[in-house]
Image: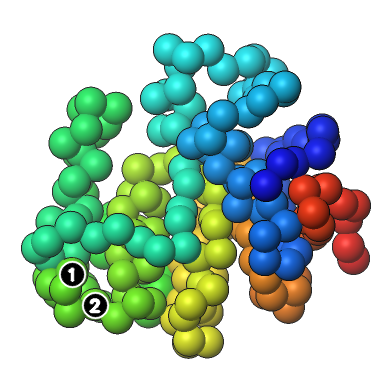
Amino acid sequence: MFLHPTNFTLYSGERAAITGPSGSGKSVFLRILALLDACQGGFITWRGERIARTHIPAYRRRVAYIAQWPAMLDGTVEDNLHYPFTLKTYRDAHFDRETATRFAQAAGRGPDFLDKLASDLSGGEAQIAALVRVLQLAPDVLLLDEPTASLDPASAHAIEALVSAWSDADAARACIWVSHNPEQARRVATRHLTMNAGVLGGELR
């Protein structure tokens, strides 16, 4: 999928949603913003500055990408939450069970959720765990690539509640939520755009 040239700005505190048919380029666009795929013929800036290759790890610490299918490690949910702190990018941070528990509770899960085996989690619970794993790192921006597409309505609403709690905790936090569901887009976002055949379209009201 090739994206047509576009200028796009996500502002501090903004909640944007992008909807469109499957294969329209929504996920490609999000992965480019996350610097997971190369941007050909264009560039991305962060707070007004182009991102140098040496600054990519720092950028990814501030801008977090959430995939539709969460990758879970063996062990408990808490074991999975510890994993990011083994990476060089987060060597100055540490795991805080209280913070993780608070995020889990925002998604309707009790303190014992962290003790569950990853192999016993439902699809919705695995997505909650993956999201908590990212949110505990305090990113400034979330890029959500259809995180509820394969979930039941109750699990989808739990994910929405968790993202909302993260966003409400700091007025400067921003997110882009890619969804195939226009109703969900209206619930989670204040700015609604469309993607069709690689063309990022105007706002819907």
Q: Position of residue 199 (x, y in %)?
A: 83, 48
Reading the image, the residue beneath label 2 is 121
Secondary structure state at the residue bearing disc 1: helix
Q: Which mark is residue 36?
A: none
One can see residue 157 in this view: yes
Q: What amino acid does circle 2 point to?
A: Leu
Q: Is residue 77 above or below residue 11?
A: below
Disc 2 crowd rating (10 Å Cα; few below 14, some 14-19, many 20+) is: some
Q: Which of the 4 image quarters holds residue 42?
A: top right
| Residue drawn where x is 53% and y is 35% of the image | 37
Judging from the image, the colouring scheme is: rainbow
Front one among 198 and 176 = 198
Image side of residue 173 versus residue 106, left or right: right
| Residue drawn where x is 13% and y is 56% of the image | 79
Image side of residue 37 versus residue 39, left or right: left
Q: Quadrant of the C terminus?
A: bottom right
Front one among 34 and 199 = 199
Q: Position of residue 202 (x, y in %)?
A: 90, 52
Q: Position of residue 18 (x, y in %)?
A: 72, 58
One can see residue 187 in this view: no
Image side of residue 17 versus residue 92, left or right: right
Q: Position of residue 139 (x, y in %)?
A: 45, 41
Q: Which mark is residue 118?
A: 1
Q: Is residue 99 above or below residue 118?
A: above
Q: Say how many tags the image has.
A: 2
Q: Is residue 128 above or below residue 45?
A: below
Image side of residue 59 versus residue 70, left or right: right
Secondary structure state at the residue bearing disc 2: loop
Disc 1 crowd rating (10 Å Cα; few below 14, some 14-19, many 20+) is: many
Q: Are marks 1 and 2 in contact (CB under 8 Å)?
A: yes
